[in-house]
Amino acid sequence: MDRSTNLDIEELKMTREQYILATQQNNLPRVENAQLYPVGIYGWRKRCLYFFVLLLLVTMIVNLAMTIWILKVMNFTVDGMGNLRVTKKGIRLEGISEFLLPLYVKEIHSRKDSPLVLQSDRNVTVNARNHMGQLTGQLTVGADAVEAQCKRFEVRASEDGRVLFSADEDEITIGAEKLKVTGTEGAVFGHSVETPHIRAEPSQDLRLESPTRSLIMEAPRGVQVSAAAGDFKATCRKELHLQSTEGEIFLNADTIRLGNLPTGSFSPSSPSSSHSRQTVYELCVCPNGKLYLSPAGVGSTCQSSSNICLWS
């Protein structure tokens, strides 16, 4: 009895709810001719959107094509770009490279068995600076000259590293075994020259000349002039002085000749000897040091022909 009663009550509730719902639907106002609004982009807006999407797609394709072309032309690889290669030891350039801005490097090497060429339309300048950025050295290679500005300039040998040439504000040193001057005028010095040895090339003459002034050779312990396989000539226009302040002048030769000396004359004691040709002369010296020849006799004839000393 209880179960059937419960079922009847539930049926009544369901019937009542259906009635209420049906009544509420009939009371709602009905809208006639309702307008439907489309959802989305239509008309000229839609065409503009498609145009911009198409333009963006074309731009992306062109950029991608240009990127691929640049990578192909510049030869981009994993190791570098074109002639530029990045290695463990640094950067390697192969072929001709051009730098439009300053290049700052620590060390530059060329490839094996290849020279290093630095070329410019105007000049090539290499600068050295200290830790404060101040210029300490500069080497400029131009079309007219090569200039070096530094405290000391040195040229060293490639084998042992010895200094071949050095120059600073005080002196210039040449450390080579030979100094060879190939000019027709030789070497010209404006001031004194100090050297332990002057020697000419084999089979060549050594000539020391002063065209307008005097030529002076001085040494505290003596001057030695030697010509082992040739002649020694000393020529001057006015006077030739051989002076020794403390020692002597020693002339050692098989034959010593003094040419173009004036010859004195005297009256011989024997009249018959005046007609004979004089072949022997006596060397005489004037008080002022002038030398002259006097015809030889039984005794000295320098006093009888000393009139030559009066002319000097």
Image (spheres, rainbow, N blue to C red):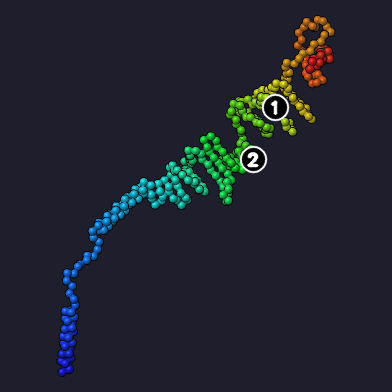
Does residue 154 appear to the left or right of 79 in the view shown? right
Residue lying at the far bottom of the rendered structure:
1
Nearer the observer: mark 1 or 2; the answer is: 2
| Residue in the foreground of this view, choosing between 304 and 34 | 34
Question: Residue 278's quadrant in the figure?
Answer: top right
Q: Dot 2 corresponds to which residue?
A: 169
Does residue 171 appear to the left or right of 6 in the view shown? right
| Residue in the foreground of this view, choosing between 171 and 160 | 171
Category of crowding for the residue at label 1, using alpha-carbon neighbours closer than 10 angstroms: few (below 14), some (14–19), many (at least 20): few
| Residue in the foreground of this view, choosing between 203 and 28 | 28
Q: Residue 116: x, y in percent? A: 48, 41
Q: Quadrant of the C terminus?
A: top right
Q: Quadrant of the N terminus?
A: bottom left
Mark closest to the chain's N terminus, 1 or 2: 2
Measured Cα–Cα span from mark 1 to mark 2: 28 Å
- Residue at left 47%, top 46%? 101
Count up the numbered dots. 2
**Dot 2 amino acid type:** Glu
- Residue 78 visible in this rendered orientation of the protein: yes
Q: Residue 245: x, y in percent? A: 78, 29
> In the rendering, which numbered label is found on residue 14?
none
At mark 2, the secondary structure is loop
- Residue at left 38%, top 50%? 77
| Residue in the foreground of this view, choosing between 194 and 145 | 145
- Residue at left 36%, top 46%? 73
Residue 182 position (above or below residue 7): above
- Residue at left 84%, top 15%? 303
Q: Dot 1 corresponds to which residue?
A: 215
At mark 1, the secondary structure is loop
